[in-house]
Image: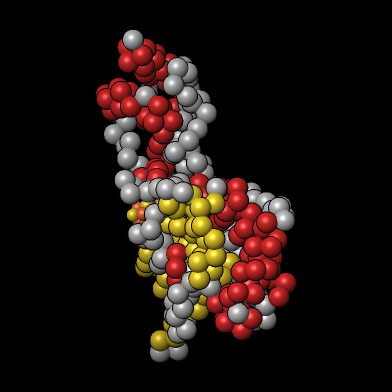
Amino acid sequence: MLPTGANLQKIHNGKKTYAITPHLPGGFIKPEVLEKYAQVARKYKGILKLTSAQRIMITGLNAEDIDNIWNELGMKPAIGFANCVRSVKICPGAAFCKRGKQDSIKLGLELDRRYIKKEMPSRMKIGVSGCLNSCSESVIKDVGVIGTDEGWDIYVGGSAGSHPRLADKLITGLNYDDALRIIDIIVRYYQKNADIERIGQFIERIGFEKFKNDVLAEFQNNVTCEMSAKPYSEGEEIIPKAGALTEGNLVFGDSIDEDSVIADIIRVYPQTIPVLRSFGMGCLGCPSATGEALKKAADIHGIDSNELVQALNKTRMEGEK
Ligand code: SF4
């Protein structure tokens, strides 16, 4: 019997080995979780492999070790249907890329929370790219999203593999909420009307004009989202929070306190970067680190957070004069 949360990888000389591929939303991983990956791979003689879906596979494992490995990773086994949303691939977008037009991390993580592992008529892959360079390969995804100066463009029906197909452009220039809303309509329309077929095959069968007219009719009737985000399990919880790198609660003129998110501090008061560095925070390019609240990051570095807050506010106020 297949061990829980594992795939049969290979049968060599009658011996079976297995792989596990934990869910890593957006490919983000906390340093302490990454260390656990290394520990279990070393202990159970596994091999680590980066996948195209922004995950880390541990492969070459024995069946009897799989339960222990999930336990030691502190994660629930990654179980999904064969026909479900398999991946949401997210590029760095406006948070990390100078070419980014939109915050692909914010939208992508929200889509991940709503749809990952959700049952579908066939496999579904989603790609979210912050600009037309389309580093998440949005036009070969079942649902593809691309950011432009005008907002989000939505593509449907792309796929790679044995039946490659470029996606059709459905609508352009949507804001964040409308992008989520039309994807919700697309998903429900597909679930309701498709046979066991990818969206591209479904569109080929019924015709793109019909698909587009039906979906846009619902969109223009202001049909609201039915899907909301499910919470992540503890092992999947990620840093940064969606949107924390390009927007936040801190605005110019606010004081910095222990709860301020480092990414916000840097964004609003870039003059504080040398102060953070002088306190030993050399990890300011790291999304995991900059998504933290100041107090948590200070504790990790063994820094007195009160002292740090005072120094940051001093520099902040000098910059405002
Ligand atoms: S798609 Fe655009 S924003 Fe995203 S990583 Fe590529 S170049 Fe940067």
Please tell me in which quadrant of the rendered image residue 184 appears: bottom right
Q: Nearer the viewer, residue 280 or 284?
A: 284
Residue 1 in view in this figure: no
> At x 57% / y 82%, what residue is drawn?
204
Residue 103 percent across, percent down from the top left: 45, 46
Image color mode: secondary structure
> At x 37% / y 48%, what residue is drawn?
100
| 35 relative to 52, above or below | above
| 44 relative to 101, above or below | below
Position of 211 compared to 314: left or right?
Answer: right
> At x 44% / y 38%, what residue is drawn?
246
What is the number of callouts on the image? Answer: 0
Position of 214 compared to 26: left or right?
Answer: right
Q: Nearer the viewer, residue 59 or 99?
A: 99
Point out the image quarter for the N terminus: bottom right
Residue 14 percent across, percent down from the top left: 45, 89
Residue 160 in view in this figure: yes
Point out the image quarter for the C terminus: top left
Q: Residue furthest top?
A: 321
Residue 182 percent across, percent down from the top left: 62, 58
> At x 60% / y 47%, what residue is drawn?
177
Position of 87 compared to 278: left or right?
Answer: right
For ligand 1, the image quadrant comes to: bottom left
Position of 292 compared to 85: left or right?
Answer: left
Q: Nearer the viewer, residue 185 or 256?
A: 185
Residue 91 percent across, percent down from the top left: 40, 55
